[in-house]
Image: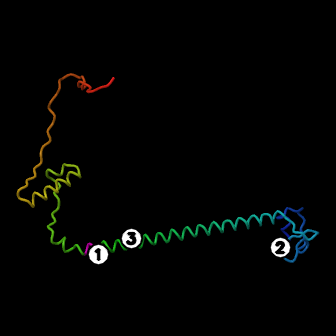
Amino acid sequence: TPELAKVRCWLDGRSGEPVEADEDEDADGEDVGPDGAAVVTALSKRLQEENEKRVELAKELEDLEKVKAALIAKFREQDRVSAELAQKVQGAELALEPVCDLLDLRPRPDEGPGAQLPKPLQLLWSKFTAIAETDAGVVVEPVEPETEVAVQGDSDEPPAKRPRVGASV
């Protein structure tokens, strides 16, 4: 190409003099020396490096596309399982609706003796209360915790140590 021939001297690192379009090129556009062997120029080195880099990046892109396809397949599988689970939960809710209608569901009181307990003990309290309501012979009453009133004395000394039992020396 005539335009490439005008700028090639600057790209190849030659002396800076323009060359004719067919002066150092064979029919394929390759640079050839006077003996017909291929001439390695700065431009051809850069083009070769660029081509190698493009091949390397193409392989990397192909690997990343495979990873992406695997992740998309995994995501679709999780989405399918989630949809199935949601459908099963909705089916269970519809199946249990008649049972829930028969149950006398009362809201839990936020006040009372069980409200001041920690959550795990509130659960136990509610279970015992439910048992007491169903069985007339059981009564559940809260018991006030006893406080320690026993004081060893008014001294600031720590309590006496317990004697050792069966110590071997």
- Tell which circle, 1 or 2, labels the residue nearer the N-terminal end: 2
- Is there CB contact under 8 Å for labels 2 and 3? no
Residue beneath label 1, please?
91
Q: Split into 4 quadrants, where in the image is the C terminus?
A: top left
- Tell which circle, 3 or 1, labels the residue nearer the N-terminal end: 3
Q: As shown in the figure, which amino acid type bears the numbered disc 3?
A: Ser
Depth check: 64 or 111 in front? 64
Q: Secondary structure at mark 1?
A: helix
* Residue 147 drawn at (x, y percent): 15, 36
Relative placement, left or right, of 93 versus 103 is: right
Q: As shown in the figure, which amino acid type bears the numbered disc 2?
A: Glu
The answer for how far apart the CA atoms under marks 2 and 3 are is 62 Å
Residue beneath label 2, please?
3
The magenta segment: 90-94
The answer for how far apart the CA atoms under marks 1 and 2 are is 74 Å
Relative placement, left or right, of 43 versus 148 is: right
Which of discs 2 and 3 lies nearer the camera? The answer is 3
Q: Quadrant of residue 83?
A: bottom left
Q: Secondary structure at mark 2?
A: helix
What predominant SS class does the magenta segment belong to?
helix
Residue beneath label 3, please?
82
Residue 18 among magenta residues? no
